[in-house]
Amino acid sequence: MLATEMNALALQSGFEKAGLKARVQSSINIDQKVAENYINEKTLKYLNNGEVVIFAGGTGRPYFTTDTAATLFAAEIKAEVILMGKNKVDGVYDSDPKKNENAKHFSKITYDQILEKKLQVMDLTATSMARDNNINLIVFNLLEDNSIIKALEGKITHTEVTR
């Protein structure tokens, strides 16, 4: 959980260097100089003011993945999309592209197809929650230069996951 706090702070720094106001909110009790406690009403206020909100700390509970935490927060704020930056993987494949050079890349796929094919995109709880809350997912390679901006603009190899 603490690693997510450090990653969130690094992401906040990047957004601020790009001229955006960014805040880190945490689901775990941490020094308020580091991150604010997550309160949905405050989050919505920040978003309505055009600020970027970065969630850290997972759910604050063991046995739940950060995928589930991201999806839970997205559902609570009624987000339309989750950006899922991966390490050296530029989307969803029919098998692990790191192990299978012939793995087929999907430019678009549904949550039901992911569940049917048992693809390892997110854990089952997160996948079902995103589907049930009609939250799209953009999966892309986080290590590509300016990947987040490119993902938002659709200018990066990615997979769009929809209901």
Image: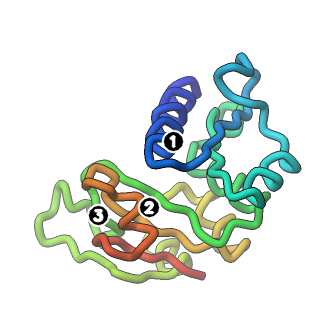
Q: Residue at x 41, y 58 (%)?
A: 148
* Mark nearer the N terminus (3 vs 1): 1
Residue plotted at (56% across, 63% down): 82
Q: Which residue is mark 3?
A: 90
Q: CA distance from mark 3 to mark 1?
A: 25 Å
| Left or right of residue 138: residue 96 | left
Determine the residue positioned at 41% across, 73% down. Answer: 153
Q: Secondary structure at mark 1?
A: helix
Image coords of residue 19 (percent x, y): 50, 48
Q: Amino acid at mark 2?
A: Val
Q: Which mark is residue 71?
A: none
Q: What is the x, y in percent for residue 152? A: 45, 69
Image quadrant where one finds the C terminus: bottom right
Q: Which residue is mark 2?
A: 121
Is 131 on the left or on the right of 144, as rendered? right
Q: Residue furthest left?
A: 101
Q: Is 57 displayed left or right of 87 in the figure? A: right
Query: At which x and y percent is residue 45?
Result: 82, 53
Q: Quadrant of the N terminus?
A: top right
